[in-house]
Image: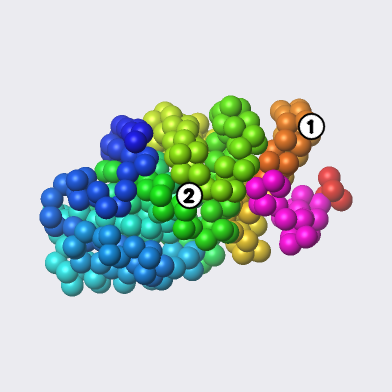
């Protein structure tokens, strides 16, 4: 098991890679705990949950709304949650983002932690203290910065993750490689079989290396005053693509990274060979299926049409 600590002005967070849901009780500070999860995670893993009240939300990005936060708030009130309660999110990115947000605003802030169940949330969403929901089509428009007390990344769960979700998570790992760690980037390029076979020891190493990079950035700039923006590589275009075309987060960010790389080449910040390597790896990971997406149309819709200069 690998442990990372993030200490910052928005709280302190302990991240444990390779720890399992079955051990979560060890990390809960006391017994006044409320669990938030979604329908999928509940149907797969409920028998492993510790015995506390559970609030179950709908699945997917469509549930990441202020209405869901309102429903959670009603449940908090019904269950007698107060400032001494602890909120545990068990799920992927949507569950983690919404749990952190609901906990951070209820009675001006409760303690919370996560068991992170998807690759995307383990390498990105659950780590770093960004919480939030979408609003009127704008991604993460409402949110807060507040660190979860702990994040358990149960890498065994990646074995049963639906293929599309599994692939989607790799976009954020590639991003970490591109922005900070050529060795991680090359490691992914040279281990496509292990990715395909979902080898747990390999995945634990990849998740761990990815979190190490993200934690290093977040420690320096927890509230994104500047430096943390490096983690948004591919996301400006990616979020627009995700909102307009409804692709997965990973597919959208992958296209966003390709567009950003092209722009970087034009500005002399990246050479053509490196941009080609990024595109090839994303393609090898089935994140940019040219037959599925009309890339030219995407580029033109988001204002990158050559005719516009
Ligand atoms: N997902 C980007 C960040 O946490 O800053």
Task: Give the position of the N terminus as an image quadrant.
Answer: top left
Whether residue 203 can be seen here: yes
Rendered view: 151 above or below 214: below
Rendered view: 251 above or below 199: below
The quarter of the picture where residue 186 lies is top right
Q: Left or right: where does residue 222 sit relative to residue 33?
A: right
Instruction: Specify start and end residues of the magenta stretch as a single range.
Output: 283-305
Q: Which residue is mark 2?
A: 119
- Decide whether residue 304 is among the magenta residues: yes
Taking the spot 27% from the left edge, 64% from the top edge, the residue there is 47
Identify the residue at the far right of this view.
307
Rendered view: 216 above or below 11: above
> Mark on residue 40?
none
Q: Which residue is mark 1?
A: 272
User: Is the residue at mark 2 in contact range of ligand 1, meaning its CB lies under 8 Å from it?
Assistant: no
Dot 1 or dot 2: first in sequence order is 2
The quarter of the picture where residue 106 lies is bottom left
- For disc 2, the neighbor class at 10 Å (few under 14, some 14 to 19, many from 20) is many
Secondary structure mostly taken by the magenta-highlighted segment of the chain: loop
- Decide whether residue 183 is among the magenta residues: no
Residue 226 at x, y = what percent? Answer: 50, 33
Secondary structure under tag 2 reads helix
Taking the spot 25% from the left edge, 49% from the top edge, the residue there is 23
Taking the spot 54% from the left edge, 65% from the top edge, the residue there is 137
Residue 241 at x, y = what percent? Answer: 65, 57
Rendered view: 43 above or below 87: below
Secondary structure under tag 1 reads helix
Task: Give the position of the C terminus as an image quadrant.
Answer: top right
Q: Which mark lies nearer to you, 1 or 2?
A: 2
């Amino acid at each position: 098991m690998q442990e990372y600590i993030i200490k910052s002005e928005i709280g302190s967070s302990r991240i444990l890679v390779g720890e399992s849901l079955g051990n979560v009780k060890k990390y809960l500070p006391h017994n006044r705990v409320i669990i938030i999860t979604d329908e999928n995670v509940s149907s797969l893993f409920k028998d492993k949950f510790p015995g506390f009240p559970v609030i179950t939300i709908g699945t997917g990005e469509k549930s990441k709304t202020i209405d869901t936060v309102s429903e959670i708030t009603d449940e908090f009130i019904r269950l007698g949650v107060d400032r001494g309660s602890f909120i545990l999110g068990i799920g992927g990115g949507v569950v983690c983002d919404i749990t952190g947000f609901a906990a951070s605003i209820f009675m001006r802030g409760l303690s919370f932690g996560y068991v992170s169940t998807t690759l995307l949330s383990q390498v990105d969403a659950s780590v770093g203290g960004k919480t939030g929901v979408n609003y009127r089509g704008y991604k993460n428009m409402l949110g807060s910065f507040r660190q979860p007390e702990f994040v358990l990344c149960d890498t065994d769960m990646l074995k049963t993750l639906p293929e599309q979700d599994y692939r989607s998570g790799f976009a954020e790992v590639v991003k970490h490689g591109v922005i900070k760690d050529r060795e991680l980037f090359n490691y992914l390029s040279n281990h496509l079989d292990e990715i395909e076979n979902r080898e747990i020891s390999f995945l634990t190493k990849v998740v761990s290396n990815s979190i190490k990079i993200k934690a290093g950035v977040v420690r320096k700039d927890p509230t994104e005053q500047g430096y943390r923006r490096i983690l948004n590589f591919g996301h400006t275009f990616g979020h627009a693509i995700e909102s307009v075309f409804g692709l997965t987060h990973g597919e959208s960010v992958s296209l966003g990274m390709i567009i950003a790389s092209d722009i970087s080449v034009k500005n002399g910040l990246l050479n053509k060979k490196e941009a080609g390597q990024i595109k090839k790896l994303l393609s090898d990971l089935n994140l940019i299926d040219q037959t599925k997406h009309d890339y030219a149309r995407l580029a033109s819709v988001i204002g990158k049409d050559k005719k516009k200069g």
